[in-house]
Image (spheres, rainbow, N blue to C red):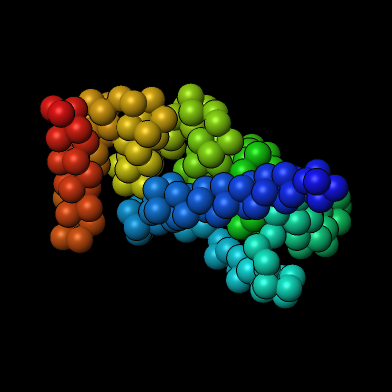
Amino acid sequence: MANEPTKQPTAGAAWQVRQVYAMAVICLVVGLAIGYLFRGSQSPAAPQPAANAQLAAPAGAMGGHMPSLEEMKQMADNKAEPLLEKLKGDPNNGDLLIQIGKIYISTHQFKEAAVYYGKALQVDPKNVAIRTEMASCMYYSGDVDGAINQLQQSLHYDPKDAASMFNLGMIKWQGKQDSKGAVAAWQQLLKSNPQLSPDRKATVQKLMADVQMQGKS
């Protein structure tokens, strides 16, 4: 019985870690990564997230266990520290702000990433690729309406941006349960991007069919 008090927190911590990694999988499949599938040459290229690979290494070095949210936050803070020092002398450096945002994305600290992406967009509001990533960060932070607003702003700057339309459909479907709105966004994506590869078209068409089938059932 004396060991009981220590078992419950351990189980709770394990559950928290499982939630973190489940969220990571969802992010890769639905939001942050899949937008790149449609980005191509139509949106400004975002800087390569070189920090991602470097941040992945400490997880294996921590005795083989999966890091907690707090450990992941510490990893991001440590990695971002030298960039934050540079930022003090150049607070409007958009490239630095984006690099810091990507560090926080790589450890699923979406609120922090959105803050730095927001500052980068103040410097360069027409950076559609970063605005699309910021929308994903806001979505995973629970701000569904804010995410939709950011994607709509992206489409204001680039009405044909496939990544923005794709993610707008995903967020309307998953975040607002608006299947009609999702299908409308994807239909517009296909209409305004006839040059999409067959694989990309098939991805969108399959999603549209699935969403429409769900609506009927």
Q: Position of residue 145 (x, y in %)?
A: 48, 24
Residue at (39% x, 48% y) in the render: 30
Residue at (33% x, 32% y) in the render: 173
Name the residue nearer the viewer: 12 or 53.
12
Whether residue 115 sits left or right of residue 204 in the image: it is right
Whether residue 91 sits left or right of residue 160 in the image: it is right
Q: Is residue 80 visible?
A: no
Above or below for 105 versus 115: below
Q: How many marks?
A: 0
Residue at (65% x, 39% y) in the render: 111
Residue at (35% x, 30% y) in the render: 172
Q: In which quadrant of the rendered view does residue 60 lie?
A: bottom right
Q: In which quadrant of the rendered view does residue 165 lie?
A: top left
Name the residue nearer the viewer: 41 or 187.
187
Name the residue nearer the viewer: 214 or 135.
214
Q: Is residue 206 visible?
A: yes
Whether residue 90 sits left or right of residue 119 in the image: it is right
Above or below for 73 versus 124: below
Q: Position of residue 3 (x, y in %)?
A: 81, 50
Q: Quadrant of the C terminus?
A: top left
Q: Position of residue 37 (x, y in %)?
A: 34, 57
Above or below for 209 versus 78: above
Name the residue nearer the viewer: 42 or 110.
110
Whether residue 174 sits left or right of residue 182 in the image: it is right
Q: Position of residue 206 (x, y in %)?
A: 18, 48
